[in-house]
Image: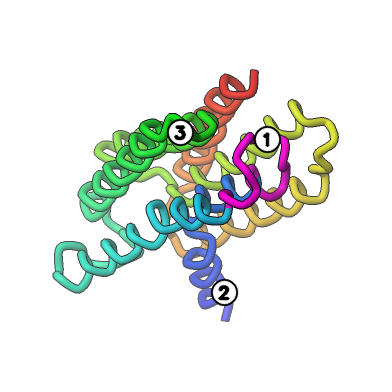
Amino acid sequence: MVRKLALLLSVVFQPLLMPSLVFGLVFFGIPQASSIPESFKIRLFYLIVSATLLIPIILMLGLRWSGLVKSLHFEEKSDRRFPFLLITFFYVLTTYFLKQKTELDPILWQGMGAITVAVALLTAVTFFWKISAHMTGIGGLLAVLAVLALYFPSFQVAYLLVTVLVLGGLVASSRLYLDAHSPAEVYAGLLVGFVTCWIGFSWIYG
């Protein structure tokens, strides 16, 4: 039962979900965080969800069905390299696409760029060490919450921050329980995500 719960948490709160959560927060949680018209936000949000979550998931399923990776859990370090490179490529493309849309708020491509840097760093480290991608995502989300709370005092962040901290603890515990990572790999992933997104989003709103 505990193992099934740990697997469920790992699957539901996977790293690919984090960009959608970040932009959902920026678009709908704090309207003043971007100058995107309300009528356009939903379409942009669907675009980001498709490019950073749905398409990568379909690609990962394709890699699994073709036998190019042994498992969607990517237990082996060698199984992570090509999928992570592929995801990084799609994130770079998404950032480039948003940057070309000069009529849009630059916060879009800059925020996506900060997330892409975190993913690229995770991918680079993966060639040498299997740090936690789940905790990289959680760390990035925590950093964005902290930056938004700092620059938008009207944003009531306390309950949301506690929720993400509890969620992060549950996800980290799940990864450790499943023996997917060591404590050092969990902390390293959290640090990569938090520091990268803290620097990136502080620069954006600073």
Quick check: is 30 in the magenta stretch? yes
Judge whether 39 appears above or below 5 on screen: above
Q: Position of residue 110 (x, y in %)?
A: 48, 29
The image shows residue 123 at horizontal and vertical percentages of: 31, 40
Instruction: Tell me where residue 89 appears, x and y as whole percent.
Output: 27, 42
Q: Residues within 10 Å of mark 2 (few under 14, many from 20)?
A: few
- What's the amino acid at mark 2? Leu
CA distance for labels 1 and 2: 35 Å
- 3 or 1: tag closer to the N-terminus: 1
Camera-nearest label, 1 or 2: 1
Q: Which residue is mark 1?
A: 33
Q: Secondary structure at mark 3?
A: helix
Indicate the quadrant where residue 53 lies.
bottom left
**Disc 1, disc 2: CB below 8 Å?**
no
Label at residue 130? none
Residue at the farthest bottom position: 1
Q: Which residue is mark 3?
A: 109
* In contact (CB < 8 Å): disc 3 and disc 1: no
Q: Is residue 169 magenta?
A: no
> Which SS class for mark 2?
helix
First in sequence, mark 2 or 3: give its number: 2
Q: Is residue 31 above or below residue 59?
A: above
Q: Is residue 83 left or right of residue 139?
A: left
Q: CA distance from mark 2 to mark 3?
A: 36 Å
Mark 2 = which residue? 5
Q: Residue at x 82, y 50 (%)?
A: 159
* Residue 150 in picture, x, y percent from top left: 75, 27
- The secondary element bearing badge 1 is classed as helix
For badge 3, the amino acid type reads: Trp
Which portion, as a residue range, is magenta?
26-41
The span from disc 3 to disc 1 (Cα, nearest Å) is: 14 Å
Residue at 58% over, 46% down: 22
